[in-house]
Image (spheres, rainbow, N blue to C red):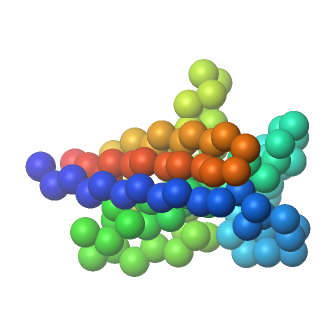
Amino acid sequence: MDIGIGTSLVNVNRFKSKKALKKVFTQKEISYCVSKIRPREHFAARFAGKSAVIKAFSGFNKKLSFSDIEIIHLKNNQPKVLVKSCSEFIINLSLSHEKEHALAFTTVIKR
């Protein structure tokens, strides 16, 4: 079994500018984050998540960009990662954020 691991720690203050958001996040991600009381923490968590996913896939010689990845939430509030052209992988993601920092940890398992 092949496994990739990725982690990322992000400063929430990086997400003050709304201009750059469309380059990194899908419209669904933007809508989700701006609906929250502290949207910058949610943007930072998603950015950390995407960065961790990119790192985890690097071990499989897959080059991904932020626009290839979308992080949605299931009804139980669990994050789910959608990646273009990577259906042969199982992706697990954990996100956490508090005031100034957001953290993501991911595992990618090739089926």
The image position of residue 58, as x and y in percent, is: 32, 71
* 75 displayed left or right of 68: right
Answer yes or no: is residue 70 visible.
no
Against 67, residue 78 (above or below) is above
Q: Residue at x 54, y 42 (%)?
A: 95
Task: Determine which quarter of the picture holds residue 38.
Answer: top right
Residue in the foreground of this view, choosing between 54 and 11: 11
The image position of residue 75, as x and y in percent, is: 64, 24
Residue in the foreground of this view, choosing between 94 and 68: 94
Q: Residue at x 63, y 51 (%)?
A: 101
The image position of residue 15, as x and y in percent, is: 77, 64
Q: Residue at x 43, y 67 (%)?
A: 54
Against 97, residue 7 (above or below) is below
Against 65, residue 32 (above or below) is above
Residue in the foreground of this view, choosing between 54 and 100: 100
Residue in the foreground of this view, choosing between 110 and 55: 55
Q: Residue at x 37, y 57 (%)?
A: 6
The image position of residue 44, as x and y in percent, is: 67, 55
Against 76, residue 38 (above or below) is below
Furthest toward the top, the residue is 76
* 82 displayed left or right of 41: left
